[in-house]
Image (cartoon, grey):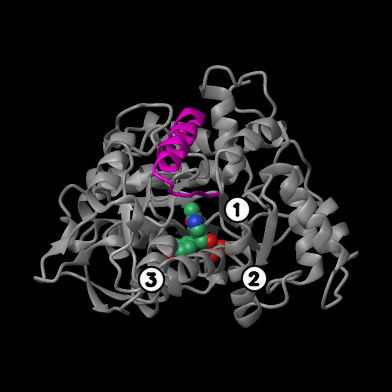
């Protein structure tokens, strides 16, 4: 079967309501044409993110009932820790309430402000970049060039370019690179996977120069599934074995469990480096909580432990990846420009090619998210100029290579007929694309401006 069906049945349902186009027009105006400002009740299909939006299983909910809310040494912490040892293999496990806290703890510990230190990555996700820059570092994106061509088909467009990485080390000096990173799958670059070979070679290159290697592990299971399906030598291995190998090359990881942890809240930092773990633990106590809960309830830790076990199931991953792929295939068949091949957790519309008459300075991605919402009550997120364009010291604006609109699919949440509704409405919009115009910024914050910006349609 090309698209394997759901390996679950539905036990609890949540009603969602349709709104009229008239209502949506007034809602989007009140929201300053920024979909982050729309009350979720006014949305029919919410594809803003796959983060924290998963449906938990009956097994996870049952686990929540055995939450041990002891301040110190909760039994759920030890189950959480054991599961992380089993999959990731790192010695020291520090829970956080979400991924960006793990990033904040890491970068506020290893970066020295004003020292010109550089963190290489395939592509930093926006919170990673913000945490690097806020702590005085420079975030360098070194993804392979083919990733910038949205139509080029390749198995591992999330790979880092090892030549660029070597050149960076030569240019700035290993002593100015406190760690190197890989984000798997590569969210900002279209949810594309990184191959095992690339993970291993990145680790070797960094370690030759004495630079520690960390993985942003948010979507590690999806990445492992792609390795199994696409990389020779892995077809017969199970997901746990592949994950074990991936992390065996690294010195540690950050993870938002809101993705492949299959939970609504949670994250962690893990490493083999004792000194670093100690420093981070002390900082954790200051800002998150005691080291055996780190900003989470005992029941949350149990749900993560169980989610991490479930996400390794191959029938789940086959359904998951193929649900996303099927949406991509429907759009491709209708000629809609999307980033190819379809990523693991999301379909990314190529807004530059969808709206070629809207220049990057007029935010084509925003134009498309607004149109999708007003047309069909679907919420997607811009990953383009509002999120990533920045000005240099001379006041010149630098635009990102890609102008994307991400349709992130929550795990185990929407049915395939709802996905069909999404595809049909996007195809309708594509046929009417000449009527979609650009936007300008009315208000912006200085950090992570896309969350709170207010926009205005251009005449
Ligand atoms: C997402 F619009 N991602 O994709 P936290 N690393 C990576 C992520 O994908 C990630 C984090 C670290 C989100 C949520 C999100 O502007 C936005 O648990 C590869 O969210 O702190 C999160 O994990 C951070 C959406 C975040 C956004 C920032 O939808």
Q: Earlier in the sequence, mark 3 or mark 2?
A: 3
Residue 394, percent across and down? Answer: 8, 70
| Disc 2 Cβ-to-ligand 1 distance below 8 Å | no
Q: Quadrant of residue 311?
A: top right
| Disc 3 Cβ-to-ligand 1 distance below 8 Å | no
User: Can residue 21 be spotted in the picture?
Assistant: no
| Label 3 sits on residue | 112
58 left or right, relative to 221: right
Q: Quadrant of residue 170?
A: top left
Q: Residue at x 70, y 37 (%)?
A: 316
Dot in front, 1 or 2: 2
Q: Earlier in the sequence, mark 1 or mark 2?
A: 1
Residue 374, percent across and down? Answer: 39, 63
Q: Residue at x 57, y 58 (%)?
A: 51
Mark 3–mark 2 Cα distance, whole angstroms, equals: 18 Å
| Label 1 sits on residue | 259
Specify whether residue 185 is painted magenta.
no
Mark 1–mark 2 Cα distance, whole angstroms, equals: 23 Å
| Disc 1 Cβ-to-ligand 1 distance below 8 Å | yes
Q: Earlier in the sequence, mark 3 or mark 1?
A: 3
Element under disc 1: loop
Residue 124, percent across and down? Answer: 39, 54
- The quadrant of the rendering that contains the N terminus is top right
Figure check: 451 above or below 398: below
Element under disc 2: helix
**Residue range (magenta):** 193-217
Contact between marks 3 and 1 (CB within 8 A): the answer is: no
| Label 2 sits on residue | 281
Q: Residue at x 43, y 27 (%)?
A: 155
Specify whether residue 194 is painted magenta.
yes
């Amino acid at each position: 079967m090309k698209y394997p069906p759901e390996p679950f049945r539905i036990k609890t349902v949540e009603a969602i309501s349709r709104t009229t186009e008239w209502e949506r027009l007034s809602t989007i105006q009140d929201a300053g044409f920024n979909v982050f400002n729309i009350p979720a009740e006014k949305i029919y299909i919410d594809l803003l993110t796959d983060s924290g939006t998963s449906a938990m299983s009956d097994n996870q909910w049952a686990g929540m009932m055995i939450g041990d809310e002891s301040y110190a040494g909760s039994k759920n912490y030890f189950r959480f820790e054991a599961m992380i040892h089993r999959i990731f293999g790192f010695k020291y496990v520090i829970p956080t309430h979400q991924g960006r806290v793990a990033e904040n703890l890491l970068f506020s510990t290893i970066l020295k402000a004003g020292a010109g230190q550089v963190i290489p990555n395939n592509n930093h996700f926006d919170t990673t970049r913000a945490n690097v820059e806020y702590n005085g570092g420079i975030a360098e994106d070194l993804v392979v060039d083919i990733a910038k061509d949205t139509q080029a088909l390749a198995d591992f467009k999330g790979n880092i370019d090892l030549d660029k990485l070597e050149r960076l080390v030569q240019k700035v000096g290993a002593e100015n690179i406190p760690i190197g990173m890989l984000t798997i799958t590569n969210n900002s670059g279209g949810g594309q996977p990184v191959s095992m070979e690339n993970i291993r070679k990145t680790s070797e290159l960094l370690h030759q120069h004495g630079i520690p290697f960390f993985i942003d592990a948010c979507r590690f299971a999806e990445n492992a599934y792609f390795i199994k399906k696409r990389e020779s030598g892995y077809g017969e291995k199970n997901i746990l074995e592949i994950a074990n190998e991936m992390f065996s090359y690294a010195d540690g990881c950050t993870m938002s469990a809101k993705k492949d942890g299959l939970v609504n809240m949670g994250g962690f930092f893990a490493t083999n480096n004792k000194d670093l773990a100690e420093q981070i633990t002390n900082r954790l106590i200051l800002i998150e909580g005691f080291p055996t809960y780190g900003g989470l309830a005992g029941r949350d830790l149990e749900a993560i432990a169980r989610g991490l076990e479930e996400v390794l199931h191959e029938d789940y991953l086959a359904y998951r990846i193929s649900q996303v792929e099927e949406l991509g295939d429907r759009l491709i068949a209708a000629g809609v420009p999307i980033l190819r091949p379809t990523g693991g957790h999301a379909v990314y519309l190529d807004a530059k090619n969808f709206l070629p008459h809207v220049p990057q300075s007029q935010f084509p991605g925003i134009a498309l998210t607004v149109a999708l919402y007003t047309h069909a009550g679907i919420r997607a997120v811009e990953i383009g100029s509002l999120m990533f364009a920045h000005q240099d010291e001379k006041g010149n604006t630098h635009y990102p290579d890609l102008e994307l609109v991400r349709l992130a699919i929550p795990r185990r949440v929407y049915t395939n007929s709802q996905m069909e509704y999404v595809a049909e409405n996007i195809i309708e919009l594509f046929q009417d694309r000449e009527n979609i115009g650009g936007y300008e910024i009315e208000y912006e914050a200085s950090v992570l401006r896309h969350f709170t910006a207010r926009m205005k349609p251009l005449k």
